[in-house]
Amino acid sequence: MPINNNDIARIFSQIADLLEIKGANQFRVRAYRNASRTIGGLSRNAAEIVEKGIDLTQMPGIGKDLAGKIQTIVETGTHPLLEDLQKEIPPELSRLMKIQGMGPKKIKVIYKDLGISSAEELKKAAQKHKIRSLSGFGEKTEKSIIEEIDRMKEGEKRFKLLMAEQVVEPMKDYLQKLPGVKKITVAGSYRRKKETVGDLDILAICKDGTKVMEHFVNYENVKKVISHGETRSSVVMRSGIQIDLRVLPEESYGSALHYFTGSKEHNIAVRSLAAKRDLKINEYGVFKGNQRTAGRTEEEVYNQVDLPYIPPELRENRGEIEAAQNNQLPHLLTLEDIKGDLHSHTKYTDGHFTPEEMAEAARKKGYEYLAVSDHSQHVSVANGLDKKRLAQQIEEIDKLNQKIKGVVLLKSIEVDILEDGTLDLPDEILKQLDLVICSVHYKFNLPQEKQTQRIIKALKNPYTDILAHPSGRLINERKPYEVDMEKIMHMTQDQGCFLELNAHPDRLDLTDSHCMMAKELGIKVAISTDAHSQNDLDFMRFGLGQAQRGWLEPQDVLNTYKLESLRKLLRKS
Ligand code: DGT
Ligand code: CA
Ligand code: CA
Ligand code: ZN
């Protein structure tokens, strides 16, 4: 098996980090960061494309220069620039970039002045109050460094869903190809579509356990074999993620799948229902005394305790058992319910494609509509739109809509919420749009009351429709800003606005429990990919998983409505 996209992406992002710490040119740093993002978002395995001799520059976003670099990585497993930088700079140092508030400048200072090169050392120095006196630091930073390091360690034990997918799906294919293998399923938190997974749990039905285990531990991307048995083996992959493989007899498949899908809390609740019926449920089957009564399918297992099948996304012991008993399980969303995407960017700001190219990608997905919502000016990372450029974009989209067939572009903007809660563009231009999305992109550290008031003020703007990525967290990287989410939800409801569930696998913001809260208040949620490229539209699957975990049904989701109904919903009464 060739190196996967995620490994390539990581190499580029390591290069970017190290260049940044070294103080290299910003453009160069950004080029590597973009490269990492482009690879991470590809729908096909770059290494396979290279090996088939197909020209990489045919893939979206990949130019000649980048294609050459990818080729080097595919062939050698690394890049010479990374090797050089790693000789120059201690590798642990780049990990410190993940600590909120620690930029490359600060890292340089602690390295040069105190010789610190790891999170461990930094935490110790902060505890001994050695950090506060350094230039650019203070007492507050020192204190937050300790907290952030603890949080980072917690987060690093879990892997984001996209990364898990990129590791486990090729493994699944690889195992499935072995003759004699009848069925391979990924269970655990991955099957429940949790936003992060601790490890991956694969179940196999096959003739010869020994053979499949041998095949498994010899997979090319395996870094370390932890255990290697006849029915159970565990390995650690190159990316650091652990995979457990279990081989089962076919008659236990349903009960094993149920057991290893979890959650543990859900399983315990189901087992206690069984106990009341004098039944015993374990991974081998359902038993009455020594008599086996079920186990081949999950439905059978549930039926033994008088329950209908409960989808994995709901199995968290958060009321799904009671709902199932009362025949009130939610009708979970599917991809077919999604009629369009309400948040996307173009090359006019920090995206990679024109509005027309994005429209084409949306049409291919069978969508009715796509909102073009570029950034407003304030965002520091992008070439944001001012009033004049937005007016030009509005004009362009009106013209495009005359020309293109099969999909409608909605005129939109992702306008920044400024520190005082006003929006970064005047009402006179906002009112010309189909859809106004507002979001926070800076001043993440305001005290709770101020941050909450800031967002509330933005929601009160008569033209605001959707609050994007409402908590601002980046999974494993940035904690949510301090806000009173309940107050924000109430204001959203009062104003007839909507909340976004940002489907980007780094964000998944709203969380599943916030989705439940929104549903309870009758607030519709927009599941939006925030696509910066055509491929990013595929992130919808992650948003969908999160929405399913949050019990959202089609009618709770703004972009399940057909265009005409959507327009009515957006018009405030
Ligand atoms: P993770 O890996 O932390 O993201 O979460 P899971 O849910 O994948 O947990 P994991 O890998 O420890 O175990 C997979 C499933 O196996 C889990 O969801 C339920 C089941 N399981 C594991 N340990 C126990 C246990 O002690 N009791 C019960 N009832 N089930 C367990
Ligand atoms: Ca697991
Ligand atoms: Ca496991
Ligand atoms: Zn955006």
Image (spheres, rainbow, N blue to C red):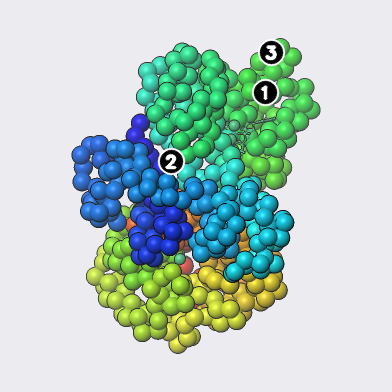
Residue 468 seen from this side: yes
Quadrant hosting residue 453: bottom right
Indicate the amino acid at tag 1: Asn
Query: Which residue is the site of mark 1?
Result: 282
Q: CA distance from mark 2 to mark 3?
A: 41 Å
Q: Which residue is mark 2?
A: 166
- Assess whether mark 1 and mark 2 are in contact (beta carbons under 8 angstroms): no
235 is higher (above) or lower (below) than 128: above
Looking at the rendered structure, the secondary structure element under dot 1 is strand
> How many residues crowd mark 3 within 10 Å: few (<14), some (14–19), many (20+)?
few
Q: Where is residue 36? Give x, y as percent.
A: 39, 52
- Does residue 518 appear in the picture of this structure? no
- Name the amino acid, label 2: Gln
Name the residue that disc number 3 marks. 291
Percent across and percent down for residue 224 are: 50, 28
Q: Separation of disc 2 and disc 1 at Cα?
A: 31 Å
Tag nearer the camera, 3 or 1: 1
The residue lying toward the viewer, choosing from 34 and 124, is 124
Which residue shows up at 20% across the image and 39% down it?
53
Toward which corner of the image does residue 143 lie, by quadrant?
bottom right
Query: Residue extending furthest bottom?
Result: 428
- The percent coordinates of residue 435 (x first, y second) are 46, 73
For discs 2 and 3, the disc positioned in front in the rendered view: 2
Residue drawn where x is 57% and y is 60% of the image:
113
Residue 121 appears at what percent x and percent y?
A: 63, 50
